[in-house]
Amino acid sequence: MAAWLEELVGEERLLLPGHSACAGCVPAINIRHVLGGLAAAAPAAKTVLVIPASCWTIIAGIWPVNAFKVAVHLTPFASAAAEASAIKAALRLRGLGDTTNVVVWGGDGSTCDIGFSGVSAAAERNEDIIYVLNDNEAYMNTGVQKSGATPEGAWTTTTPAGSPRAGQKKDIARIMAAHRIPYVATLALGSVPMLRDFRAKVTRAAELRGFRFLHILGACPPGWRYPTAQSTEISRLAVESRYFPLFACDDGKWRITFRPKHEVPVREFLETQGRFSHLSAEEIDSIQAHVDARWNLLAGLESQAEMPVPTL
Amino acid sequence: MSQSLPRGRTVMTANEAAAYAVVLARAQAIGCYPITPQTLIVERLAELVAGRDDVEYANLDSEHSMLGYVIAASRVGVRTFTATSSQGLLYAHEQLHRASRERVPLVMVNVNRSVFAPWSLEPDLSDSMSQRDTGWIQLYCSSAQEVMDSILCAYRIAETVLLPVMVCAEGFLLSHTSEVVDVPDQAAVDAFIPEFRPPKEWVLDPDVPRAFSGLPEPKEYAAFQRNVADAMDEARNVIETVGSEFGSHFGRTKIGALESGGNPEADTALVSIGTIGDSARELLDDDGELLIVRVHTYRPFPAAELSSVLSRAGSVCVVDRASAFGSFGPLGGDVRSLRLEHASAVTNFICGIGGTEVTPATLRWALHQARSSSAARGGLGPMYVPEGV
């Protein structure tokens, strides 16, 4: 095993064993690597997690238990970004601003829908926080309802198969980049090379100051309707099919950070999940066309003139 | 550059008095979102703290975010301030409930304004009175001086019992009306309000992996709520003590649960809140058979103090400036819940809604009804004072 991988295996777990996430919960693996990556990047720094209403309200533990080895501040659905801003501000007043990462771990409903105004405002103020979008593409904690991040064609309990076209997944990463914040990146964990990309992005976020936005794909077995053992495989297919491209906008410079060596049609990704099982061949072709168009757009952004962000 | 504060007797509005009180109280984190008629408070504060690195001032995207901001800053152990009105208060409603259970000692000024729909900028108390059961201590003012004094007391009260305090002042009648206000010295305020030192286990500390407000078992959830009720009860004594101390420290009238005037032996008593209590004083000029009571602390409700001051009254007339649909007004219902030994009737009148004028004549009309009309006595609901009385 490569030395860097061995180090990861041995690193301290900041989400403790015994937490109550579902079997196969990809976000539970993702958060381990966010917290681990931040700790590795700056061992002396502490992290405060700010968690709005979500599965993570429960996974964090039944009061007064804390499933995390970091301080956790739970918030209502819509105010995590404002509260993270406040925690950072108050820590600055207490002289702890430089030694604490304030990290929001918010779902797609919180980020793209009900809390969007607050996320946008915190980005506009360039608050010195890391905002992580834990994107499982629907309101999963309430039992799989459509959110602004639900992809086209996906079944949810409020967009049953055959319901009228429910909308396109909000392109939240590009929306956030339009705020001219220091760092926007997309992350997913489906293979060892993707893990390297993932950890490099967490490290980069830790190095920077200002509003950093990490958009992480979090496959959800009950919500996406697939067997728990396939979580990693599905995350890999999401990236290799270019359904979820891995890219970054670092100081205004766009780059696709992970070009799959083995590209697969989006059909291979869709076929793994019950939420897409009702789609016709024509509908899958249409999704493929949208996936290709977005990839081309992102590739075009790489050669776009840089628009450096204002310094904090 | 930050501006300096006025000292001594100075002409100012209640909004300005609020801003100066907040600076004197050394609030460290201020959350801002504009709404008429509160806006001048946060504007003046922005000027006063500009360039200071010991104060964090944030422009938020909504009152919901703004309340979240001050709750979270307070959780980290710093003194906070925010202000709002009407729609803003209602927009933040979810956070108000939460603030009391999180036991964060926020101080917020609500400049009272009528509630949409239809639109109105004018004052009534429906906005804050409808937040009665959110677990906030509520203080209602009748002058700019009282706004300043109440804010200074509010920090002491909030940080002693660990509950949020809402200081309420009617829009325009107070917020935009200039009066003479006696501004205390910074040194005197520093001697009155000690540094904020919350319990250690209450503060979010990056070195301690604690989770705040996680999902408890039902029994523990209920205990969170019961603890707020206990803190409210404790607040009764603390408000009394802090008010007395304030009076002697600054040489001013005590700010307590209520204020009374007129004839304590009178058969008729008029109970009101806010600026109506001030208008009621004029009735005493030609009515020797009247006791007037102005409620300053609405929550915790001063049941003992009211029962005592109203113990000899036969007819109690309660005037509300907040809407009530299907039952008594907020103050009327509470006063009716008291066991008053000698009261044969407690009548409830609603007036001043949407900024309709409440003059001594309005109150005389209400008193006349209370004293003479059998229809109003012991009825099943309040009587709306007709517009134009």
Image (cartoon, rainbow, N blue to C red):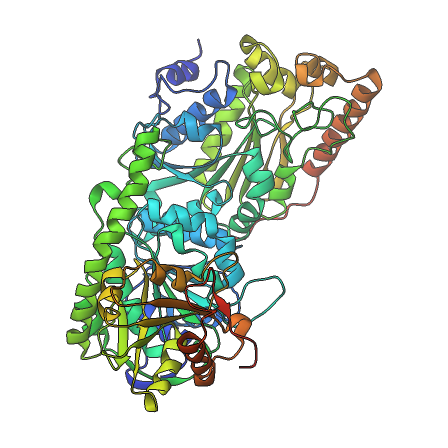
Residue lying farthest front?
B374
| Residue A7: percent from left, percent from top | 38, 17
Left or right, residue B29 beside residue B63? left
Left or right, residue A11 beside residue B369? left
Q: How many marks?
A: 0
Q: Nearer the viewer, residue B171 or A177?
A: B171
Q: Nearer the viewer, residue A286 or A188?
A: A286
Give the residue displayed 29% in from the left and 37% down from the top: B223
| Residue B208: percent from left, percent from top | 26, 35
Q: Quadrant of residue A4?
A: top left
- Where is A289 relative to B61, above or below? above
| Residue B176: percent from left, percent from top | 47, 79
Give the residue displayed 46% in from the left and 41% down from the top: A76
The quadrant of the picture occupied by the N terminus of chain B is: bottom left
Q: Nearer the viewer, residue A176 or B62?
A: B62
Is residue B60 something that shows in the picture?
Answer: no
Left or right, residue B191 beside residue A40? left
Is residue B331 something that shows in the picture?
Answer: yes
- Where is B259 relative to A255, above or below? below
| Residue B290: percent from left, percent from top | 31, 81
Residue lying farthest bottom?
B286
Give the residue displayed 65% in from the left and 30% down from the top: A146
